Amino acid sequence: MRKLICVAVAGLLLASAFTGGADARPGYLKAFKSKYTKVAENNKLTCATCHPAKSKKVRNDYGKALGKSVAKNEKDAKKIGEALDKAGKEKNAKGETFQSLLDAGKLPGTKE
């Protein structure tokens, strides 16, 4: 019985080592909410602001613009803020800057 428990525990440890953990980046959403309060008042902000699909590898146009401006898994709030500024200067497919949409209290990304 003791051997069985040891084997089960070892198997669970081994399995957990090979599975990917959650890759949440709540600092991005927190920075977005504090920077764009008008957008936060008008919309329910979630990870779907940048990731419209269930898979977090899928990004909308704003998420792609932000991804070009910030290092993966950045935790420094100042750098995240700078990346939000850079992403705001980029334009969507309609030729509107993301910043103009944000200033109007609208979500910047598409649903794609």
Image (cartoon, helix red, strand yellow):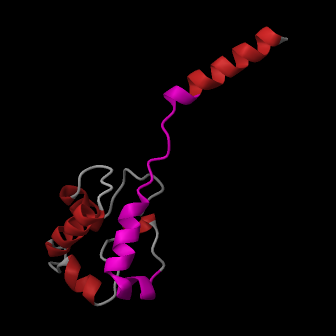
Q: Main secondary structure of the magenta part?
A: helix
Q: Please tell me which residue is depicted at 22% across the width and 77% down the height of the picture.
A: 98
| 102, above or below 111, in the image | below
Residue 37 lies in the magenta stretch: yes
**Residue nearest the viewer, comparing 45 with 95:** 45
Counting from the top left corner in percent of width and height, residue 109 is at 31, 72
Residue at screen point 35% across, 70% down: 31
User: Residue at the right extreme?
Assistant: 1
Q: Residue at x 29, y 58 (%)?
A: 76
Figure label count: 0
Q: Quadrant of the image for the N terminus?
A: top right
Displayed quadrant of residue 90: bottom left
Q: Indicate left or right for 76 with 85 as reference.
A: right
The residue lying toward the viewer, choosing from 26 and 94, is 26
In the image, 18 versus 30, the foreground residue is 30
55 sits to left or right of 91: right
Question: What residue is shown at x 34% (from left), y 73% (from top)?
Answer: 32
On screen, 89 above or below 56?
below
- Residues in magenta, as a range: 16-43
Tell whether 68 sits left or right of 46.
Answer: left
* Residue 110 rendering spot, x and y as whole percentages: 32, 71
Quadrant showing the C terminus? bottom left
- Residue 50 part of the magenta-drawn span: no
Residue 39 percent coordinates (x, y): 37, 84
> Relative to 106, does residue 60 appear above or below in the rendering?
above
Quarter-of-image position of residue 29: bottom left
- Decide if residue 43 is in sight here: yes
Q: Is 98 left or right of 4, judged from the image as shown?
A: left
Q: Is residue 111 visible?
A: no
